[in-house]
Image: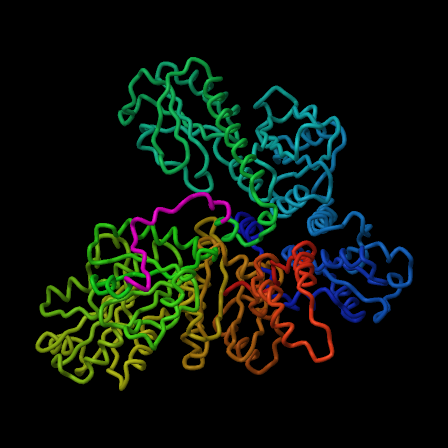
Amino acid sequence: MMWMCIAVFLLWMRSGGCTEKANTSDLIEYTAADFYEKLHSGKTMFIYFEHQVSPTISLFLEKLEKSAEALQDYGVLVGKVKCNKELVHTYCTEERGLHTAFLFRAGKEFLGFDLDTVFDVNSIVSEVLFAILRDEVKYVHTDADLLAMEKAARGKKDLVLGYVRSLGTQEHRSMMETAYVYGSKYQFILITGGPVLKHLGADEPSHSSQVWFLHCRLHRGFTTSERCPLTRMRKPLSTLSLHSFLQLMEAPLVSEVYDDPSSIQPPLFPYQQIPQVFLFARPATEHLDRETATTLAWRLRGLALLLLVHRQSPAVKTPDEYNAAYRLPGKSSDVKYLTLHDLDEVLELFTNQEKEEEEEVEEEDDEDDSNYEKLDDEVAASVFENRGDLLDMDSITQLTSDNFHAAVAQSSLTVALFYLKWDAVSMSFLSSFLEVAERLAESAAVQMSAVDCGEWTDLCAAQAGSSRPIPFQPITAFPSVLMLRPQESAQRYRGMLGAEALHRFIVLSHQASPVLLSTQKEVTSFLQEVPHPELAGYKPDRVLGLFQTQTDAGVSLFTEAAKSLRGEVLTGLLTHELAERWAAEHAVDLPAVFVFPSWRTHARPSTLSVSTSAEELLSHINSALLHPLPELTVENLPSFLSLGKALLLLFVGEEEDEIGRRQNQALVEEMRGVVKLGGGRMERYLPCWIHLGRTPAGMSVLGSYLGSMPPLPALVLTHLPSGDEIYQYPPNTPIAALSVLQWLQRVEDGDESAAGMLGDDSWPPAYYFLDYLKIMDMQEPDSAQQQTPAGEEDVDEADVEEEETDYFANSPAPDTKPNIHSEL
């Protein structure tokens, strides 16, 4: 559903990016003309009119700048106007402007915020969203107010009630962010204490922020109580936990099944982390058992999914002595069977488990270093959280400068990971690498190995002057994976840093490139069969080279190109009579190259002539393998970006029904029409599309391109070789092939205005204590003394140490969320 896509977009998008002014510093400074232009356009703006900058105001401006990235996700422009340079009437001339930030909507002032209430990023985002949503999010003070809202919502809409200790906190922000996404589906209510908590069964002084879901959408007459049944969210309040909680509230109260619990699959997304409880129903007591299941389901709401198993089905093999069972999430998904005498036993089982998990989480939180709690990098945070889990390295060979040559020589294929222990991505990928090593443990032909480049710097630097030269260039990016074969140059793995992609690449790269085919049966097997049992369901691209003899001049060129394609494409070689027969069947002359793309449904290949160089032949093969209108995914994106073409990118939403599926199919067909009608002029573009249901990461990409989420479908032109401009096809214009070509012509003629700009890639240290270069500079007083001009005093060593101490104590963290585009 579309609202689920938007939810995922807002919950995981933190990429900043392509707004009308991509740089955060540019975004936050407006001239008077800019301000009036945006004001008259009706855009929502949060503006501070700067007079004199005191330390307090300076701190506020720093937080204001950082909030710009978060609020742009919700279509709010954040900025400031320097009144000493740009005089804006009223706001630069009145006293209230000194300590007030203003929210503008629909071309007029909407609300003013005292700076004491918007003191950091959380308070700015939460207060602004609260103001925008003040008609959607209700604030109740008494239980009578809540009762009135429950009566009004009965049979219409469920309520989501959040208690936060104070406004402007992280919890308040989480509530507002979620309300922005789900406001049309649920009625959100906010409280900060008072008598309402007593009705909810919470003790205000001893409880942190909490959320309750009030089931008011039930049909009238379902319950005799005038109050709506409620479910408390048991996890700490955050945007992600609240999203997961709302998803769980959409699950059926009781699911009736006719299979044995052991044969029922564990719950799928988004319920994969939720336990399952099974109750058994007998034919004679089915009605009573269903009522019992419903009663228990209400008590387990938010804790577990309840399934009622009908014993009348012959598929149910559970002995009669058991009347209940459960399955916990995790690697071991075994079903455990119980004989219960009271429903409280089931409830106690899961409430005790919940308490244990909460206690473990609290203990872990207390141990975490406060600095790492501020890290925004998810990979670094994940590595830090799992720092106590020691990886089992027994499945791989540790390569060193001493054993490298011997280890590579004894195996036909050595897969080597070059990593750094202090690099978060290296350590995260190391887990996937070890997983692949375990899967390949029984393969004697593949040796999985690793090099710690922090310890063996001479090996990773690949010194050319060594008596025994290293078969690869110096390692400059971490992590890196190389395929090493005796007497051959290394082949670099350039795929996704995940277990599945790496495993597939290794299995395919172990095939001969090219494989010599001498019979028709071998050719048929090469073209149709799965290359390896572990790749069942995967269809690789295939390329055949046809030559008169193996000594033809073109064979060496084809072989060189085939080695470059190893691991990604299966290549075969035909010669003599078999090659002549294939050439005659396809009406081509020898030598020739046949390309069989995996996306093509029919068996007829693309035919290429043998080029004058391996590089040219490789380029032609890659062009023939390219889909004329590919669907972009996270996995194939790098290969398409490497083509250097402008992306003509269509975003389509997830289909809710068959009509939506047909509409998306029609849009893709129109894009195919663009390719056909455009002919040769489309060579400079890569027409492609993203299905946001299958690739939800595209939501953050689209939002970062345009600064806010446009209506779908959306068509954009980006990654132009000539510049960083981003163009959007007019949103209210139907996407038709001829209209798209005319729009492209206007873009080429300079008659279209850019909708955004790609930002510069910038990856500053995640936190000041990771800025190693700056630390090293501060620890080199000797070099500083050497550069001191004559006549000036040398820098005292104690002063340097004091400066370093002050740096760690007072240095602010660099912006860990640079306002740059997503990597698409």
Q: Is residue 365 left or right of residue 307?
A: right
* Residue at position x 49%, y 17% in the image: 344
Secondary structure, magenta segment, majority class: loop
Q: Is residue 648 visible?
A: yes
Considering depth in this image, is 39 or 519 the residue closer to the camera? 519
Considering depth in this image, is 325 or 803 the residue closer to the camera? 803
Quadrant of the rendered structure where residue 339 is? Answer: top left
Q: How is the image coloured?
A: rainbow
Question: Would you place residue 791 above or below residue 200 in this image?
Answer: below
Q: Position of residue 115 (x, y in %)?
A: 80, 51
* Residue at position x 83%, y 59% in the image: 54
Which segment did they paint magenta? Answer: 384-403
Q: Is residue 541 visible?
A: no
Considering depth in this image, is 469 or 84 the residue closer to the camera? 469
Q: Is residue 349 left or right of residue 391?
A: right
Q: Position of residue 352 (x, y in %)?
A: 50, 24
Q: Is residue 395 magenta?
A: yes
Considering depth in this image, is 260 or 333 the residue closer to the camera? 333
* Residue at position x 62%, y 36% in the image: 157
Question: Would you place residue 656 above or below residue 329 in this image?
Answer: below
Q: Position of residue 815 (x, y in %)?
A: 63, 60
Q: Position of residue 24 (x, y in %)?
A: 67, 65
